[in-house]
Image (tube, rainbow, N blue to C red):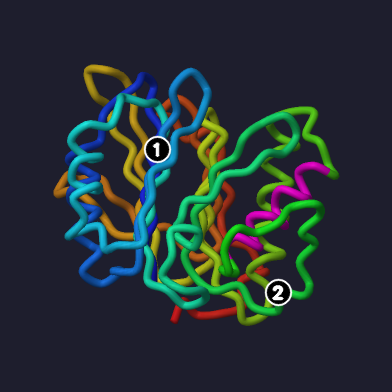
Amino acid sequence: MCELLGVSAARPVRIQGYFDEFRAHAVDNPDGWGIAWWEADVPTVVKEELAANVSELAARTGAEHPASSTFVVHVRAASVGALTVDNAHPFVGPASERTWVFAHNGTVEDLARLDLGHHVAAGETDSEQAFHHLLTRLERSPAATDDDLAAEVLATARELSEGESRVNFLLSDGTALFAYHDGHKTMHLLERDTPEGPVVVVASLPVSEEPGWAALAPGTFVEARGGVVVRRVDPGPWIRHDGA
């Protein structure tokens, strides 16, 4: 099914505990892994086509990654595309003078409907094409405000999940962390206060024993900035499937 993990924090943090628990989920998602973090507003992405739970690189990355205020992490169960590093998530690309990082869970159907603009895929996945469609929409509708940006991301999310598609994703430019759950499998949210400030964690399945994890209803869209949920859009009538 693939799984997602996203973190937004008020100050740069390390997520080794969450990451170590998350990479153990690669037992059921063995087809690659990846992690993105930001330093000086520039994303670093480390990814591999191996299973995260047996990868020496994954173990080392969990122990040694720099502190960051935003993380996007993924473990893959392949449905489209070979087991290659180019098909591992997250993906990185530019739009509207920002660099975006994207990770996806599910399968996007009817790829011919997607407008990929000038973007050329490095791999074979439906996920990368969905990302390029999202980048193209952001490029063609430049956001004047944060509200405009969120509206465009949500509109694209709804479009991608039409018909028989299954679309959960994380998207970030290092400042905003967007999470969308269309009803495929599950997604959970944790909001917590720490001595270093507030933290928001979004994950397909909880990655700790902390109280406060809440399952998101199908159709929920969340935006976090600086460890705080600044926008939450509840489910709407566009949901067309049952989460199977």
Give the image location of residue 232, x and y in percent: 54, 44
Q: Main secondary structure of the magenta part?
A: helix
Residue placed at 34% from the left, 31% from the top?
Answer: 199
Of residue 9 and residue 193, the one placed in the foreground of this image is: 9
- Label 2: how many Cα within 10 Å (few below 14, some 14–19, many 20+): some
Give the image location of residue 196, x and y in percent: 27, 17
Residue placed at 30% from the left, 26% from the top?
Answer: 66
Q: Earlier in the sequence, mark 1 or mark 2?
A: 1
Q: CA distance from mark 1 to mark 2?
A: 28 Å
Q: Quadrant of residue 8?
A: top left
Residue 114 within the segment the image draws in magenta: no
Dot 2 corresponds to which residue?
Answer: 111
The residue type indicated by label 1 comes to Phe
Find numbered disc 1 in the image and state the secondary structure of the residue it sits on: strand
Q: Quadrant of residue 65?
A: top left
Q: Is residue 169 left or right of residue 73?
A: right
14 up-or-down from 130: above or below: above
Magenta stretch in the rendered image: 127-139
Dot 1 corresponds to which residue?
Answer: 71
Q: Is residue 220 left or right of residue 62?
A: right
Residue placed at 70% from the left, 53% from the top?
Answer: 134
- Label 1: how many Cα within 10 Å (few below 14, some 14–19, many 20+): many
